[in-house]
Image (tube, rainbow, N blue to C red):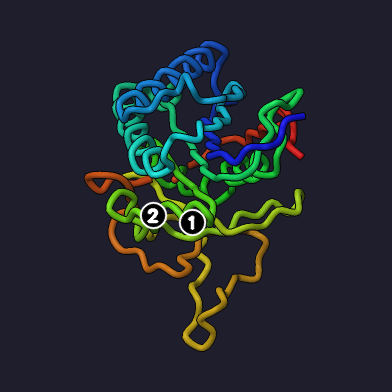
């Protein structure tokens, strides 16, 4: 067993994949890979060098160490969104491709017998499956990408390069999977869309009397909360005020199509 390596992890999942016919799934897979490769090439990234695990309706990607996180989040994701919107503009709703994209970093074993063992892999997949991310993408039928990043990525990458990623366009959410004993904060935006006022349950921000805590509604349903940032205007990242959110079916990586543990 090799020592684990600290890498940037990207989990991508297609919306409504299981509702497609066999032929539609076949076509969606083909366009999915083409669009990812074209978007990466357009911003100077070589996806051939990425280590990936395919899952039909999505993939887990482990990015080489030399790739800058800011380029992935600030340029690749907005470019992917732009190409998806163009692709979808001439297609019926059943043939459109819309994606949830989750980004995290952590230790991962690259020599697993049936996937990539590591809690970071489980974590990024949980982000991609999050209900608020699905709700956000569903709220914007014309959106191409919903981006959710871990707190670490938001703190260390997004806020450090505000000219590329526009941190004020992100909102804080809580990702909860009670059946898997998982509950963590993350940050979400819907590319080129204003997530404020969307039909998504909002968790109120901290009160003046208790600024260190975020009040929550007494319910198991998890929604979006604004946290420490007041968001105005569109939620966007990247150059030209490009933004990033998603709905889809659950996809797990790490141990194949099953539940990564």
Q: Residue at x 61, y 45 (%)?
A: 106
- In the picture of the structure, the residue carrying the numbered disc 2 is 195
Q: Residue at x 51, y 43 (%)?
A: 103
Label 1, secondary structure: give it.
loop
Residue placed most toward the observer, 206 or 239 = 239
- In the picture of the structure, the residue carrying the numbered disc 1 is 200
Q: Residues within 10 Å of mark 2 (few under 14, many from 20)?
A: many
Of the 4 image quadrants, the one containing the C terminus is top right
Residue placed most toward the observer, 261 or 179 = 261
Please indicate whether residue 114 sits to the left or right of residue 75 in the image. Answer: right
Please indicate whether residue 171 sits to the left or right of residue 21 in the image. Answer: left
Q: Is residue 15 visible?
A: no
- Could you give the CA–CA distance between mark 1 and mark 2, rounded to whole angstroms? 9 Å
| Residue 143 placement (x, y as % from top left) | 37, 39
Placement of 130 over or under 111, stated as above or below: below
Q: Are marks 1 and 2 in contact (CB under 8 Å)?
A: yes
Asked where in the image residue 82 lies, by quadrant, the reply is: top left
Q: Residue at x 34, y 50 (%)?
A: 165
| Residue 197 placement (x, y as % from top left) | 38, 60
Q: Earlier in the sequence, mark 1 or mark 2?
A: 2
Placement of 139 over or under 186, stated as above or below: above
Of the 4 image quadrants, the one containing the N terminus is top right
């Amino acid at each position: 067993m090799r020592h684990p390596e600290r890498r940037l992890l990207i989990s991508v999942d297609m919306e409504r994949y299981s509702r497609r016919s066999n032929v539609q799934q076949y076509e969606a897979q083909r366009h999915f890979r083409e669009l990812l490769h074209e978007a990466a090439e357009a911003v100077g990234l070589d996806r051939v060098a990425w280590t990936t695990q395919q899952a039909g309706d999505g993939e887990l990607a482990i990015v080489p160490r030399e790739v800058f996180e800011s380029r992935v989040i600030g340029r690749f994701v907005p470019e992917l969104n732009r190409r998806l919107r163009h692709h979808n503009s001439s297609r019926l709703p059943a043939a459109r491709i819309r994606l949830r994209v989750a980004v995290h970093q952590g230790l991962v074993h690259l020599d697993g017998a049936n996937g990539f063992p590591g809690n970071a892999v489980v974590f990024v997949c949980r982000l991609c499956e999050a209900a608020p991310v699905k709700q956000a993408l569903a709220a914007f039928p014309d959106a191409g990408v919903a981006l959710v990043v871990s707190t670490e990525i938001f703190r260390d990458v997004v806020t450090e390069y505000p000219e590329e990623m526009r941190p004020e366009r992100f909102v804080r959410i809580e990702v909860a999977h009670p059946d898997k004993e998982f509950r963590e904060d993350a940050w979400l935006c819907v590319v080129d869309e204003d997530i404020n006022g969307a039909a998504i349950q909002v968790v109120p921000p901290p009160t003046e009397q208790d600024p260190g805590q975020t009040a929550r509604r007494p319910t198991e349903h998890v929604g979006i909360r604004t946290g420490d940032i007041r968001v105005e205007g569109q939620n966007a990242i990247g150059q030209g005020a490009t933004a990033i959110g998603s709905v889809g079916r659950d996809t797990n990586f790490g141990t194949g199509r099953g539940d990564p543990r």
